[in-house]
Amino acid sequence: MRSGGNGGAGDREAVSGEADGRRKGDGAASGERAPGGSAGAATLPCARLTARQAIAAVADTYSEAAVPDGRGTAPGAPSAPDGPLGWRGYDDARTRARERTGEDESVVTALATIGDRETVVLSFEFRYLGGSLGERTGDRLEAAYTHARAHGLPVVSLIATGGSRMQEGMRALTQLQRVARQSALNRAAGLPQLAVLRDPTTGGGWATLGAAADVILALPGAQVGFAGSRVRPPDADPFAYTAEGQLAAGHIDAVVPPDRLRATLQRWLQLLGTPKELGTGGVEPAPTPDALGPPELPETGWGAVVRARAAGRPRAEAYLRAYFDDREEISGDRCGGADPGIRCGFGRRQGRTIAFAAQCGTATRPAGFRTAARLVRLADRLGIPVLTLVDTPGAANDAAAERAGAGAAIADTFAALATARVPVTSLLIGEGGSGGALALAAPDRLWATPDSYFSVIAPELAAAILKRDETQIHQTADQLRIRPQDLLDLGVIRGIVLPA
C-alpha cells in the first residue's frame, strides 16, 4: 500500500517534468509567449495555457517582475551541478524544459492591471517540470510577496502544479514553509490573496498558494487535491479530487467558466480593495437595510411567530438584492462542509464594499457558522464593515450536526463577532431562534423588522419543557416577550426598521 508523502510531487510530471512536453509537443513553447503589455481580447484561460498566456487571459496589461538571484549564491553564480542532491540528469532536464517552454523556472511573476487594480500575479508553467516548486521557484515567490507588501498590492495566483520538485528533495519541500510564511506576512498586512486553480493543482502548491488564499476560484474540471493521480489510493473517489468535488466539500469558493474568469477577478479585486482605499481612519458601519415586509407590528407573541414563519415573507435573497449594487459570494467552511442555508460574501453599495453573512430561514448547520466566522475575520483583516441578516429557527440539532461540531462552530462565530475590530451591523429579518440566531447578531448593534421575532427558545418547545399542553403555546409566546416591540423594551435591539 502506498503511504502519504503527498507534500512532494503531487503528480507524475513533477518527477521529471517532461511527460507533458513529450505528449503535447513543443507547439506552445517560447514562440507563443505573450509579451508584456496589452492582452489579446480573444485569449481565454484554460487548463493548459502557458504561464504567460494565463496571465494575458485575465490581465489588461502586465510586465514581468524582476527575477531574483538564487538564494545563498552570489549574483550570476551557477547552482550546484544537478542541483542540491546532485540528481543525475537534473541539469539536462532543466535545459530541455527551458528549450520547450522558453522559461527558466516553473513560475512567472508579473505586475499586472486587472480591471483598475494593480496586482502581483504568480503564474505557473506546467510544462516546466510539471510546474513543480524548487528552490529558485521559492526565490521568485518570496520576492513577489515581498513586493506586494512593499507596495500594498493584492496577490493573484494562477496555479498549475504537480507539487514539490523531487530532484531537489527536502530542499524543495521546505519551500512550502517559505511560501507559507510569505503568505502569512501578507495576510497580517491586510493584503488580499486570490487563487485560481488550473489543471492540475496538487501537492504543496494546493496546500500553500491555493488553500491559503482568501478567495479560491477554480476552472471547471481541474484536478485539485493534495494527492496527485499517482499517489492516491487506487479505489479513491475521483470526484473528490476535482474542482467540483472540492466546491461541494466547502474547500473552494466557486468554479468559474474560463470566459467569466477575467470579469470575476476584476469584481473580487474591486470588492476586496487595498489598505490604500480603506485608509487609516475609523471604518463606517454598514447602513441598516430598510424592511421589505409590512410596517405593522404584531399584536401577540404568537402572531409574531406566524408572520416570521410565513412562506411569502421576504428572505435573505430579497434583502441582498435590494441592498447591494453587485456582490460576490464565498462558499464553504474549509473544513469539509458547505451550508446552502447561509449566504456570505462581499457587496458594493453606493461605492463602498460591505461584507455580509445572511441566514436564509433554515436551521443553520455547523458549516454555515464556520463560513460566517471566516467571512467576519476576513472582513476584519481587510478593514471592511460587516452586515449580518439573522433569520433561522435555530441551529441544526440532528446527530450529523453534533458530529460536525455544532457547539464549537457556534462558539467560534460568537468569538468572531465579539472580537471584530470593524463595525458589525445586524438586522433580524425573520425568525430569531435561540443561540443559532444570536451567534450572528452583533452585540449592541441589532435592529429588527416588524415581521420578525427573537426568542430564547421556540414557544412550542418552551411549552413542552414546562409541561404545558398545546393550548398554552400562545400564552407562552406572550410570556416570552418575543415581538419586535418587546425586544426594544427589553433593550435587546436598538430599533425597529420600517419599509422605506
Image (cartoon, grey):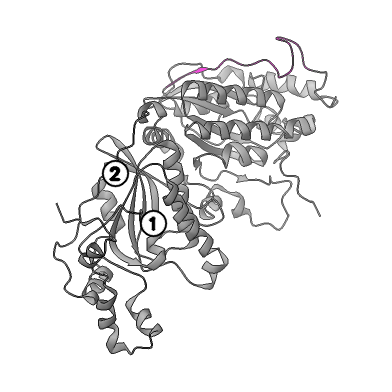
Q: Where does residue 397 sit, x and y in percent of width and height?
A: 47, 71
User: Residue 34: x, y in percent?
Assistant: 52, 19
Q: Is 500 placed left or right of 183 in the picture?
A: left
Taking the spot 76% from the left edge, 13% from the top edge, the residue there is 78
Exactly how many numbered labels are in the figure? 2
In three-dimensional space, the C-alpha distance between marks 2 and 1, rounded to whole angstroms, equals 15 Å
Residue depicted at x 51% and y 21%: 150
Residue 219: which numbered mark, if any? none
Residue 435: percent from the left, percent from the top? 41, 65
Region of the chain picked out in magenta, as a range: 61-79
Find out whether residue 70 is within the magenta segment: yes
Instruction: Say which residue appears at 42% left-offset and 45% top-offset.
Output: 420
- Height in image: 379 above or below 441? above
Residue at 58% across / 17% down in the picture?
31
- Element class at badge 2: loop
Quarter in which the N terminus is drawn? bottom right
Instruction: Report the residue marked by disc 2.
Output: 286
Main secondary structure found in the magenta portion: loop
The reply to whether callout 2 and callout 1 are in contact (CB within 8 Å) is no
Question: Label 1 sits on what residue type?
Answer: Leu
* Residue at image mark 1: 440
Position of 406 relative to 97 (above/below): below
Of the residues shown, which amino acid type is indicated by label 2? Answer: Ala
